[in-house]
Amino acid sequence: MKSYLKMDFYRMLTSKYFGIGILGVVGVYGLSLMQLKSQDVYLLNYYIKFYSTYMLLLIFGAVAYSNAMMEDLEYKNYYLQIQKGSFRKYIWSKVITAFISAVIVMVLGTSIFCLMAHFKMPLLSPDNDMLEYLADGDYLSQLITPETIFWYLIADAAMTGLMAGIFSVFAMWLSLFVKNQMFTVMVPIVGFYFFVNYFTRIFGENDYFKLNVIYISNGKIFETSFSCFCYALFVAVAIAAITGKLIYSKMHNDIWGDRNVGSK
């Protein structure tokens, strides 16, 4: 598994899509800065979650490695990778890399923007009249101070990255059916509405199953910040793992059909 992960991470980090994803995140924040009136970066980060531009963050977060499986099928790159290795490890390495790449892109993109924006406005203005109201329902509220606001923004970006990671793996699965790069790019938008609406229909207004509460509004589902973050991580990993199983089954059928081979 280690050798597969090394190869996939190298491929991801040297891919043009990795750079496009980071620059895209910076660009979305920059565009929002020009459109939205905000006295500090914290408020800008809050406002953007309620505009359609937030969907662009999910797209750029998921773009780094979601096409990897489709490219391997198109160019038959998978053959050499599984001929003397493990098909199972090959698949899960791709899934893990796609998931983690989204978190990395979001964190790096947000970090770069914060450092750039800091020259124009404070990360957290002392004159922010909405601070107490907004922080009250945020489980990361203890990080909303002038000394730690940068780490709040990074932690919040990681939460968005976890959701983008879900959609990155989801896009990887759908790319095996619709082998179109533009379709894959748009999956996060479709996926967001699908998961939010579908989960709401099944589980009702239960915040434990609402992705927008878990990842966007940082809702206090549990009493402690650590419990909330662990739950958000668990949900993201669980959905990605289930989707990974679907990818495994689809790829196995595409390569070997119903024959019981290549499963090691």
Image (cartoon, helix red, strand yellow):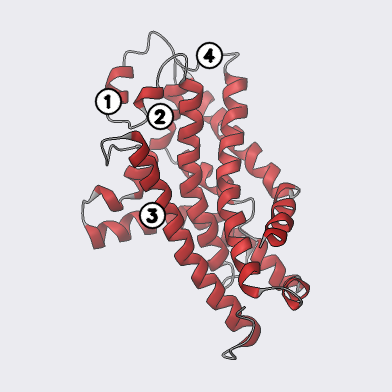
Q: In the image, is 133 to the left or to the right of 99?
A: left
What SS does tag 3 mark? Answer: helix
Q: Which residue is mark 1?
A: 136
Q: Residue at x 37, y 37 (%)?
A: 226
Q: CA distance from mark 3 to mark 2?
A: 20 Å
Quick check: marks 4 and 3 in contact, CB under 8 Å? no
Q: CA distance from mark 1 to mark 3?
A: 27 Å
Q: CA distance from mark 4 to mark 1?
A: 23 Å
Q: Earlier in the sequence, mark 2 or mark 4?
A: 2
- Front residue of this view, candidates 116 and 158: 158
The disc at residue 121 is 4
- Front residue of this view, candidates 130 and 258: 258
What SS does tag 1 mark? Answer: helix
Residue kind at label 1, given as amino acid type = Asp
Q: In the image, is 48 to the left or to the right of 106?
A: left
Q: Earlier in the sequence, mark 4 or mark 3?
A: 4
Residue kind at label 4, given as amino acid type = Met
- Front residue of this view, candidates 153 and 181: 153
Q: Position of residue 237 (x, y in %)?
A: 46, 55
Q: Which residue is mark 3?
A: 193
Q: In the image, is 75 to the left or to the right of 98?
A: right
The disc at residue 46 is 2
Q: Residue at the bottom extreme?
A: 259
Q: Residue at x 42, y 59 (%)?
A: 238
Residue kind at label 2, given as amino acid type = Tyr
Residue 157, compared with residue 8, is above or below; it is above
Q: Quadrant of residue 81?
A: bottom right
